[in-house]
Amino acid sequence: MSGSGAARRAPTLPLLLVLFAGLAVSVVLSLALGSEPLRPAGVWETVRARLTGAAGPDPVYDAIVWELRAPRVLMGAVVGAGLALAGAVVQTLVRNPLADPYLLGVSAGAGVGATLVIVVGVFGGLGVWALSAGALTGAVLASLLVFGVSVAQGGLTPLRLVLTGVVLSAAFSSVSSFLVFVGDEPEATQAVLHWLLGSLSGSTWANTGPALVAVVLSAASLMAVHSWLDALAGGPDAAAALGVPVREVRIGLFALTSVLVGVLVAVSGGVGFVGLVVPHLARMAVGARHAAVLPVAALGGALFLVWVDVVARVLVRPQEMPLSVVTGLVGAPVFLVLMGRRQYGFSGGGR
Amino acid sequence: MTHLRCRGVRCEVAGRTVVSDVDLDVPPGRMLALVGTNGSGKSTLIRALAGLRVPAAGLVTVDGEDLHAFSARRRARTIAYVGQEEAPPEDLLVGELVALGRVPHRPPWAFGRAERAITLEALEAVGLAHAVDRRCDRLSGGERRRVMLARALAQECGLVLLDEPTNHLDIGHQTRLLETLRGLGRTVVAAMHDLPLAAAYFDRVAVLHRGALRTVDTASTALAPTTVEEVFAVAAARLTDARTGHEHLVLGPGAAPSRTVTKRTTP
């Protein structure tokens, strides 16, 4: 159609192939980048050897590339994909373009749990898993609280969820701040701040696996109801008239995003902006159908966070920056440009 | 072809009874218009008839079966509903929006590749087939209403429930939309504000007044000038066109009532 209102859109499948190829190349490239610069040839030899099941020829390269960087790069891709998926779903669930994965109180709750671990030392018996366990426990408890309050005050309607999530998030943040304040240890404060702003430095093969499983299962579940998500974007009455069991689907989406975001926050802290901006970029590229938005957002989020982590590692080496510092600096201008475009209207958000 | 009935239906909004004791019988293929003043409960009743809200009392049956025992999917394959202010999501294409009407006919994970023909057919019926690849936010208000109707048509249900389908349409599109509805041969219940249009295109007219059904009858009886004057507090007359013999409902000052209209007391 050549009419004035005809849409300009990227074809979904070719775009997915390009994003996937870009992601694969980026993963390998980013293995060579970090606080310790490595020769690309040496990195490539190590990866090739490891992929065939052997150890790398150079033990130093093998340790840095395969034990330190590879899980971290993969975790970046997994967390980026998961946050973008969660963001897309929460935006549909609450029908609000400003929604992000942390809207429903999950990350603020996780923050309380993580702060308790760092400052007070709860879950001390769990060793390296203590921080993740604390964050996950906090995330689950916070979700249950948001869910309970929303249902008690009239149901899982978009407005109710947004209000409850925002208000309880603020309360949880206050609790975290209080704990840091009374803890009065500069080192602990530093650690809490670093965690709250997101970091992939804790990535190991052992915690990459569970995060990958959570993201893959979530992606599969969401794709299994993609047309219901399309219907839900038009509002509860429209969705119900199109045969969507609205109440059940809302509860399911809430539970799924809570668990997904809880796991992501437990392994990476609070990485901002990815879940807000990437779904919008995906919608601009391929339109609003979830069958296209979900995979494009997932691959786009993965690609984005892999490079964000490279910047975080390289820019101030040998130190590293929290991820939210980088995503915020990149994400805020992108979001402003995006909001300024008249071409783009989010469901219901334009009015 | 679907037979819609309801018996003793009472609807509440936030604990307050809006309409009660509603008995309706819409035989297969017939069209019923619901008329009444703003706030008379038309929308609430339509949503109850569509199975979107459970009535506080009474029973809605579709082909003899209790509607509220239907699963959401089965209901959506039986009844197509378009709300009063429902507008398409702005970032969907017209074709994608209309194809949502096929959602109840396939599992939620299916991609529905073979739906183009049904989508185009539904858009053809509302005169918008040329706009299939246009973005929904580029449509005029009237085009949006017609696109929403196309989605309902794509649902291919025997029963179509519409809340003020002619809202925002110019008179030409109003008549064409109602002619389209007539041509469907499906059972249609629609809330209408335009009484002459309701009289001209619907088999029967139900008048809602003060939280109850005032009357359900053929248009000439249900919209008798005395009823219209009482319910809507507006002068009304039926004039017969000498050339064609058709009767027309005339409203407003020009209707020259035979008596002064008493001011309507608030219900």
Image (spheres, coloured by chain):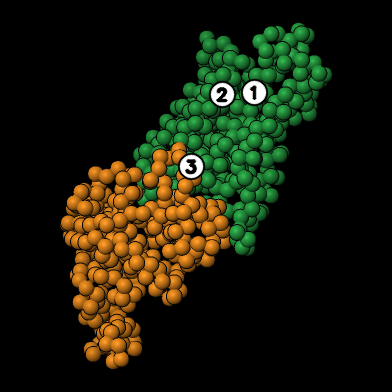
Chain colours: A green, B orange
CB atoms of marks 2 and 1 within 8 Å: yes
> Residue B127: percent from the left, percent from the top?
47, 66
Picture disc at residue A317: none
Name, please, the residue furthest toward the bottom: B242
Please state the chain letter of the residue tagged with numbered disc 2 in the rendered image: A
Q: Do labels 2 and 3 share a chain?
A: no
Q: Looking at numbered disc 2 in the image, what kind of residue is underneath it? A: Leu
Residue beneath the point at 20% across and 69% down: B216
Q: Name the residue under label 3.
A: B111
| Residue A120 in sight | no
Q: Mark 3 lies on which chain?
A: B
Query: Mark 1 falls within which chain?
Result: A
Q: Picture coordinates of residue A267 (x, y %)?
A: 58, 22
Residue A62 appears in the figure: yes
Q: Distance between the residues labelled 2 and 3?
A: 26 Å
Label 2 sits on a secondary structure element that is helix
- Looking at the rendering, which quadrant does residue B184 occupy? bottom left
Q: What residue type is labelled 3?
A: Phe
The residue drawn where x is 29% and y is 75% is B199
List the residue tagged with mark 2. Answer: A212
